[in-house]
Image (spheres, rainbow, N blue to C red):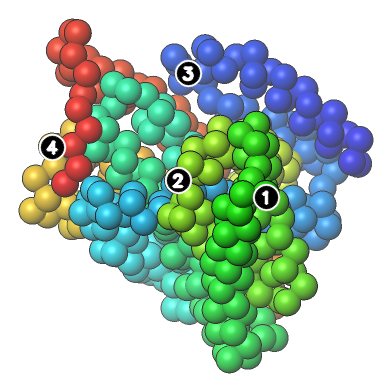
Amino acid sequence: MQTALLLSFAVLLLIGVLISERAHRTVLSTAVLFLVGGFLLGPGAMGLITVSTGDPIVSGLAELALFSVLFTDGMHVGYRDLRTAWRLPGRALLLGLPLTLVLTALFAHYIAGLPWLESFLLGAILAPTDPVFAAAIVGREEVPGRLRHLLNVESGVNDGLALPIVLILLAAAGGSSTSGEELLFEIILGIVVGVAVPVVVLSLEKLPFLQAIRSLQPLLAVSIGLLVLAICQATHANLFLGAFAAGITVATTSPGLRHEFEQFGELVTELLKLAAIMVFGALITPAFLFTEIPLAGWIFAVLALVVARPLALLVSFLGARLPVGEQAAAMWFGPKGFASVVYGLIILESDIARADEVYHLVGLVIVLSILSHSSTDVVIARQFARRQPAGTEEKTSHG
């Protein structure tokens, strides 16, 4: 199985790299390529990849990928990033995120028929966003800098904000044998480890006889991440919050190291994400989508994408004086990202009564999100380019 997985990933990666230039200009998407590729190669189609949700490789890859995602996300939201241009991301995070969670929970209860506790758990899982599935919006200069900054900071922070809510609601639903006090200790310890390890390592690196040469600077950040991962696993601290706290600490205390690590870290995280998306695609079968999910589940999924976040951000941006086009783009581009995939797998492996139903709804929303957001980002980016006068560049405006 591992050989087939490796070969499949290598082939899809090669195709993805070779079409990346065209994908940058069209509705083609590497995320869709790996999702559809995993689906076609998986048990539901060709059967070349045989994986199930209980396989150690699935949970291990998902855990490692999310750790890397949260570590690099934290790198994007250092203190300086939050201090400069915090108003719009602050609105999206402090008001938009809770409203999205609540609206999604309402749809889950009244449309999908889930109990209230599971509904709010589903809302917390689906509240985070991921700009990887809308890369043309956050990575193109013709898109207003204010909008790119908003989506980048929001997506960088909301994974970490949603995680404690997911863990607390999961424990309340009976999905964990950990007591409330133990869960709180794991969360706090994860944050402590995530802050302490970078501080100690970066303090050592400042000593004259321990400085790293520039070419190895990215590996210094990697060593910090690996230390946090190992210590969290050894102490049973929450490794995801540890990763997020470590990324923020590195970005805050050593902006230079963040800059050196940025490209290398993004590539590593992208590889792990794409591998996990391929495996996630292999877990999605025709029966999963069309037999095991009732019509009410499809209605919920559509409402979660086209109503919950847009309505939440509409309320959040009241009085913000954000141009209508930018506001509409921010409302639409709330793609459900990789964190939601892993949170869904955590739920599936738990002992709660409606775990399978929650996971199916999470999976459906993510599939629809990848397909819809990844196929519309270039189109909307071009709309911003057309509005821009020839020979001028959009100035970043923070407000």
Q: Secondary structure at mark 3?
A: helix
Q: Nearer the viewer, mark 3 or mark 2?
A: 2
Q: Is residue 260 visible?
A: yes
Measured as percent of width and height from the top left, residue 380 is found at 31, 25
Residue placed under numbered mark 3 in the picture: 24
SS at mark 2 in the image: helix
Q: Are marks 3 and 1 in contact (CB under 8 Å)?
A: no
Closer to the camera in the image, 30 or 105: 30
Query: Residue flagged by tag 2: what amino acid is it?
Result: Pro
Q: Residue furthest front?
A: 208
The three-letter amino acid code for the residue at tag 3 is His
Residue 225 appears in the rendering? no
How far apart are labels 2 and 4 at the CA level? Answer: 31 Å
| Element type at mark 1 | helix
Question: Which marked residue is nearer to the observer: mark 2 or mark 4?
Answer: 2
Q: Disc 4 and disc 1: Cα gap in Å?
A: 50 Å
Q: Which residue in the protein does label 2 denote?
A: 255
